Image (cartoon, rainbow, N blue to C red):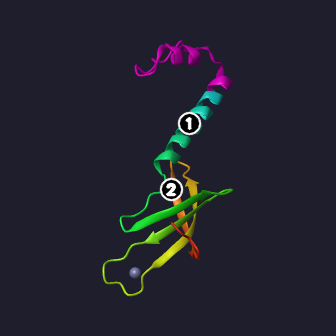
Amino acid sequence: MSSDAPPTPPEELSDDVTATLQELDEQGLRRAIIYAQELLQAADTAVTEIEPSPNEDILRTTDRDGYTEVVKQVRCADGCVDCPHGPYLYHVTRESRPEGGAHTHWKFIGRVHGEHE
Ligand SMILES: [Zn+2]
């Protein structure tokens, strides 16, 4: 049958990591891949942190089970007669994409009363 040479490890990978991976059997390698994907996903989540738009202030974020409560205050241009607008409450969920990464989904809940900064 085939006597393929073993694949060349990436130079950027440390010898420790390479050696550890080479010692793994098939099942161990699959576990390593899954773990690496989880690490990637965790890193992605940090990148897609909730950030306010230029005309908004985030007053409060609270992590709940499955979503994050975000209270946002909208800053209007000078001269707006309806101010203040908000603060408004949103439920923000992070949705993982099958191809990797995630995006945040903002669901408008309503105006919040009694939020004091
Ligand atoms: Zn306004």
**Over which residues does the magenta segment extend?**
1-29
Residue at 69% of width from left, 56% of height from top?
Answer: 65
Residue nearer the viewer, 75 or 35: 75
The vertical placement of 94 against 78, above or below, is: above
Amino acid tagged 1: Leu
The vertical placement of 68 against 15, above or below, is: below
Task: Characterize the local packing of mark 2: few (<14), some (14-19) or many (20 or more) Cα atoms within 10 angstroms.
Answer: some
Number of marks in picture: 2
Please say whether residue 11 is one of the residues in the magenta stretch: yes
Task: Identify the residue at the far front of this view.
Answer: 116
Amino acid tagged 2: His
Q: Regarding ligand 1, which quadrant of the image does it lie in?
A: bottom left
**Does the Cβ of the disc 1 residue fall within 8 Å of ligand 1?**
no
Q: CA distance from mark 2 to mark 1?
A: 17 Å
Residue at 59% of width from left, 38% of height from top?
Answer: 38
Q: Quadrant of residue 61?
A: bottom right
Residue nearer the viewer, 100 or 51: 51
Task: Identify the residue at the far bottom of this view.
Answer: 81
Task: Characterize the local packing of mark 1: few (<14), some (14-19) or many (20 or more) Cα atoms within 10 angstroms.
Answer: few
Residue nearer the viewer, 54 or 101: 54
Asked which secondary structure carries label 1, the reply is helix
- Regarding residue 46, the answer to whether it shows in the image is yes
Please say whether residue 45 is one of the residues in the magenta stretch: no
Residue at 36% of width from left, 76% of height from top?
Answer: 76
Task: Identify the residue at the far left of this view.
Answer: 78
The vertical placement of 34 against 79, above or below, is: above
Residue beneath disc 1? 39
Residue beneath disc 2? 103
**Does the Cβ of the disc 2 residue fall within 8 Å of ligand 1?**
no
Residue at 44% of width from left, 79% of height from top?
Answer: 84
Q: Is residue 40 left or right of residue 80?
A: right
